[in-house]
Amino acid sequence: MQQRGLVILTPIKPGQVDVLRQLLRSRIDPIWDAQTGQQICRAGMPFDRLHMLHFACIAVLDEDGGDAPMDPCLLFEATIDGAKGDFLDELITLCGPGLDLIYSHCEGYPASGVALPHLVKSYLGGHDVVPSIQYQGHPGRTISEIRGEDGLRLKLLKTLEGIRQQTADLPITRTEILHRLRRAVIAPPEDGETDGDTRWATEKRAEPIKTRWGRILVVLAAAAFGLLVAGVGIWVSAPNAAEYFLCMNQPLGPDTGCRAAFANNGAGTVLVAMSAWPFQWGGWLLSLIAEEGELFWTAAAAVASWLTARGLQYLCETQTKPGNAGTGWLLLQAARWAAVGLRAMALVAIIGFGLTNLGSVQIPNWIAYNLAGAVLTGALVLLVGLPALLFLRYIRTMPSLDSSFGHATAARRAWLSLASDTLWLVMAILTWLLLVAANWVTGYASHPPGMVFMTLVTWGVSGTLSVLFLLALASAAVVLWLLSIGVREQLFDNRSFEDATVLTDVAVDASRFAREGHGVNKVQNHLISVSRIKPGRLRLLRLRFVTFVVNQMCVWWFTRGELGDVRDIHFLRWIIIDRGRRLLFLDTYQGSWSGYLDAFIDSGSVHGLNAIWSHTYQYVRGVPRPVGFPRTECMLLKGARDERPFKAAVRASQKETTVWYSAYPGIGGVNIITNSRIRDDLFRPLDTAETDRLISTIR
Amino acid sequence: MEQVEWSDVQGIVRRGFGWLPQSAFVLLSVADPAKARHWLSRLPLTSGADAGNRDAMTVAVNVAVTFAGLQALGVGGTSPDGFSREFCEGIAPPLHPGDQVSRRSSMLGDVGPNDPHGWRWGGLATGTAPVHILLLVFSASDASSDVDLLTGPEDQTGVAQIERLLGWLPEDKTEHFGFRDGLSQPSITGEGAGSPLHLHQTATGEFLIGYRNERGNLPVSPRLSHDPEFGRNGTYLVLRELEQNVAAFESWLDNAATGHAPRAGMAYREWLAAKMIGRWRNGAPLTRYPDHDQVSDDFGLFDADDGTRSNDFFYHAEDREGFRCPIGSHIRRAWPRDALGSDPERALQQARLHRLLRRGRLFGPLYDRDNRDAPVNAKRRGLYFACMNADIASQFESVQHNWINNPKFSGLADERDPLIGERAGDSCMTVQQSPVNLRLRQLDQFVVTCGGGYFFLPGLRAIQRIAASNG
């Protein structure tokens, strides 16, 4: 089962910050019983009765110092197994009094409190911000699995000790030990023993798909892209092939002196031809439209009707306010569904139209000669367009892009979904146009025998090369532009921000992190950091792009319990809040604060850390100017490697974790992975070395 | 290797003064700031340059101060000004209202019997005088009389003696549990035992302020208002009084060896003790010499040894699973070399960032193993643990917290250092063995902390600056 994170940010009523903080400390924060090693939850907020809850944290985020301080808000972070809706239901049912107590200090909370649970649920759900980056250190492990596997380890440990005592000096074979371990797991519990039943451990652990296949998929996608590029490279380097496809591209006749020109000046002609391709494509499309006018007018009409229907749907969505009822609302919903239906019909029309018209132009030729080219062209379009689409989808599912408090995000969401749907349509049309154009040109060109193979690859290659050439041109310009922006940003930063080394001298209020390292936080610790994002629209866009890339890596690649080389993380989140002006960092990790940051600084993940945090700065009491993050080179290097200023910067940006709960406080992230591995290995066939390793890992 | 300005560095950084076996660590408080400053300026301090030639030396004197001491001398302001936070708060900071134990004490494992409320000096026991100055005197014959010479009556020198910690160093460099100690030391300049080994070459800035550390950065230097270079050639000194309960150690080993025949039982005891420490009694490391038979008696002393036998070993290649030197054993915890994580290169690089330069001395008479009931065995004995580092949080505290007292060290589940770790409930240690691990249970409290402090060991010029300041 997938773990999810809930991050609920609600504004606090003015003047109630201290009261709320005191309340959280004295009446909500669970008490740690050192004797039993358990957390005792308070009456109003029984976290331990929420069976889906891994970690919960409640804190007050406010700022001291600086201009335009953030409105203080209450943070409620929860990591859960299962659906958010179910969790909120359970939370409201079981922790109602506590919620009322806390949220009565927040703005917008329904005055009726949990007496009307659906209102509270929509309030909390509406203030949930989706993180820009989420990393899970042990993905797919539910609470019962984590606890159970630790109990399993203890049971196996006891069994091993029993074996050792029994067989003090007699040698015992590994297979026999393994058998006894397995039997201990399968054995039904003794009478009276309630939690000794470990028979569930014989089942194979359910791994989420992304954990199991994520890396393989990434590798396959990279290989496919690599093959495509390699194919292009091979093709270009074979001079005959280049000549053929260059000259094939001339419409209405194969030989227009192109071959002669190529024979004289090979490479130059390639470049000239490459630059001419986009215009040639354009020319062909236009002549196609002129020739087969009806084809295109019908298509245009279908597209226009799709756009109209989609626009109508957008209007209906933005006009709908949640919680409304009545005839006006009913009419809006009816209009919205009508628009959805129209849109579906228009889409069907476009597809059907496309299919029939593809076929109407030289059916046998199309199948014989253009399938490979069409597939290549389509693959190319997908590979280029897919990242753009993923990015858009990511933006679309992230109301926090512009997260402000309240329900205003619905309009933004509607707008973004409109943009992404339109992009889908544009891509579909583009693909179809390319296919049609490719087919049409072949239909008119002659096909001497022996050129079949050339034709097959030509269209894919020419399309690829056109796009690549355009991209290269564009990239050069973009790179220069970005560099200039980078230089300007650097100058701005040097002017406006103090160097981070001043932070090492500033006294920091130690009570903010007084809970670290002892009591319930002996093994697991929590870190909240709020910093401001440096001004500049482009900088914000770049930050969003960086967070997008890092998030994709966390989802698809870092699924085995390590982020770079850092293994001590339970759950980690980065969230852009306050309308793109602040960066919130939430981290539940194993070990001490300084040991954990050291692990980051000395590993490869420091580059990702630098890339994200180099966009931030903060105001610190005692320093007149704002202080930037330790200076980075090229956004990736140095930065956090300067360990004293970096640690001082983290301390300065850190907020107090006032309330913290953990469903398994004594179990660290590394242990969870080891326990899972023990369970996985126990019931599968093992050879001698693996058996040895398994037995020695049980400790 | 940077050139170290040894004439400005106090001698204890360069040498442990092993040829001066008697020592006295004197805890002083400042009664009269002006007189105390004058007294400081007149102390015959031994520099690193002096420590380089040992022949003429019969006594060595070094001095260190606490943050409270700097303030009492009228020098330090109330703000840190470049001094590390740990130094300013002290090793046993007072508790916040409502707390049972301070965060630092919890991190260092100073809980239960080690709690600062029970310390004989430097802690939170009622009536404890605050320590301001630490005078380190090393002498060939009688340190106590040398101390008397150096300090005088309070109204003359302006300092009052709180406690005089007399220590000594046995010839064979063993400590009270019977194990050879001080073998693994980092080397700053390529001098000293073990120094040719590249393994132990450590950047100067890890132990001296004003030089670059392993990461290539300059550690933050303490400053005074009129002297930005105050911290140069200085370092932070951590002193802890560790009382060793040798009787408990011996009886625990006896219990563990019950059921074995007498001769086999002796060998088993030795083997168990070695597994807990990570070395045999004579210092041979388990990783290289896993069987006692390989360790013959004339393996003997390692003074002349350049460290290749005693200290040139790695864990990853030879002993990854811990079958020779257990993963939770004392020396593996105190310095894991390349054992942490899957990449030995990176692990070694990271482990280098947390080294300590140790200069300990024993106190109390040796335990008489042959005659358990001898009256000498009832006396207090233990170790004055002294180490130097440029960054207390990242070195001393990190070693205590992330390695020694970490129940999750190196992938273990729930065990701490068997020798000096914090005890809680049933303290265990796993000895990795094939086919089944051996689990040692019910480890007693063998070592108790009874005093401690964070000190700053200034350079010689800095001491003159203290003296010259007007307060």
Image (cartoon, coloured by chain):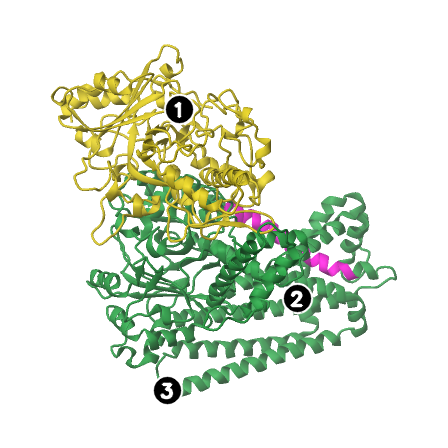
Q: Callout 2: residue from which chain? A: A
Label 3, label 2: how far apart the Cα atoms are? 46 Å
A151 left or right, relative to A29: right
Q: Residue at x 56, y 65 (%)?
A: A184
Magenta-span inclusion, residue A472? yes
Is residue B288 among the parts visible in the rendering? Answer: no
Which chain has been coloured yellow in this picture?
B
Residue A328, numbered label: 3
Label 1, label 3: how far apart the Cα atoms are? 95 Å
Measured along the vertical axis of the image, is residue A465 above or below residue B343? below
The residue nearer to you, when weighing B118 against A654, is B118
Q: Earlier in the sequence, mark 3 or mark 2?
A: 2
Q: Which image quadrant for residue A253? A: bottom right
Magenta-span inclusion, residue B221? no
Residues in magenta, as a range:
A456-482
Q: Residues within 10 Å of mark 2 (few under 14, many from 20)?
A: some
Which chain has been coloured green in this picture?
A
The amino acid type, in three-letter code, at marker 3 is Gly
Residue B170, numbered label: 1
The residue nearer to you, when weighing B352 against B149, is B149
